[in-house]
Image (cartoon, rainbow, N blue to C red):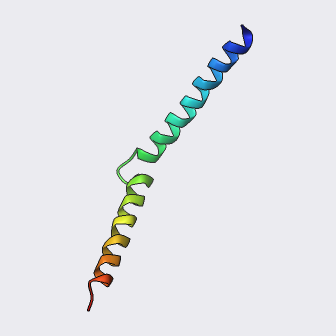
Amino acid sequence: MNDRRSQGQAIVEYLLVVALFVLALTAGPRSPLESLFHAAADRYQRFTATISMP
């Protein structure tokens, strides 16, 4: 029974760490995730502009 309880506690701890990590990525006005999306959009726009040149 003790092993099963330890497994449940480990899952809860793992989920808590993952939730805090996701919160850290998405929180704030200029979050790291938003910066990543902005950089990807900028690179894609530059790529398509270069491809469309004659």
Q: How many labels sit on residues?
A: 0
Looking at the image, which residue sits at the far bottom? Answer: 54
Instruction: Please say if 33 is above or below 13.
Output: below
Furthest-right residue in this view: 2
Quarter where residue 47 is shown: bottom left
Comparing 13 with 52, the one in front is 52
Specify the farthest residue to the top. Answer: 1
* Above or below, 28 relative to 2: below
| Residue 31, position as x, y percentages in the image | 41, 52
x and y percentages locating residue 53 in the rendered image: 27, 88
Name the residue at 40% across, 44% down. 27
Horizontal relation, residue 12 to residue 27: left or right: right
In which quadrant is the C terminus drawn? bottom left
Query: Toward which corner of the image does residue 4 lie, by quadrant?
Result: top right
Q: Nearer the viewer, residue 26 or 8?
A: 8
Q: Nearer the viewer, residue 32 or 46?
A: 46
Left or right: residue 11 versus residue 46 is right
Q: Which quarter shows the N terminus?
A: top right
Q: Quadrant of residue 23?
A: top left
Q: Is residue 35 shown above or below 19? A: below
- Image spot of residue 3 (x, y percent): 73, 14
Q: Residue at x 50, y 34 (%)?
A: 19
